[in-house]
Image (cartoon, helix red, strand yellow):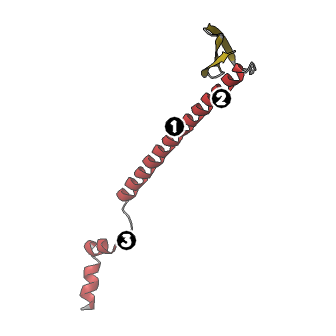
Amino acid sequence: MAGSITARCRSRRCASQKQQGFSLAETLVAMLLLAMTISTLLQYHRALALGFSQQWQQRQAWRVAGQALLGRDVEGWQSQRQQQSLAGGCTLERVTVTGPQQRSASLAQLNCH
């Protein structure tokens, strides 16, 4: 009786039932999904880094515009000033700055005496 069990387990069907682990197709699908996930996460990280960089550059433009309103020019930035006299002895001063990476900001200040 023991010989008949051994004879049956030597067949292909018995060997496939005892097989453990993943097949080549399953492994390749898992590797493909992993590669796609990593690629998507890297693209997301790149987009976030670009957004943060642009936000930092715009904040820098606002700071330079504030300095320009105070009469302090910052090296590497171009500034344009406009003054407009208003009724009641007030003056509207507007400053527009443009930076090295074409970032620009515009601020206005109302001065009344």
Residue 27 position, x and y percent, is: 40, 58
Compare marks 1 and 2 and give the one earlier in the sequence: 1
Indicate which disc residue 20 carries.
3
Label annotation for residue 60: 2
Q: Which image quadrant: the C terminus?
A: top right
Residue 74 in percent (x, y) is at 74, 22
The quadrant of the rendering that contains the N terminus is bottom left
Disc sitting over residue 47 in the figure = 1
Residue 102 shows in the view: no
What amino acid is labelled 2 in the image? Gln
* SS type, badge 2: helix
Nearest the camera: 5 or 50? 50
Classify 46 as above or below 96.
below
Front-most of residues 44 and 2: 44
Mark 2 vs 3, N-terminal side: 3
Residues under labels 1 and 2: Cα distance? 20 Å
* Residue 21 quadrant: bottom left
Q: Secondary structure at mark 1?
A: helix
Which residue lies at the image location 35% right of the left edge and 56% below the top edge? 25
Tell me the kind of residue under disc 1: Ala
Please tell me whether residue 47 is drawn above or below residue 112 in the rendered image.
below
Q: Amino acid at mark 3?
A: Gln
**Which tag is nearer the camera, tag 1 or tag 2?**
2
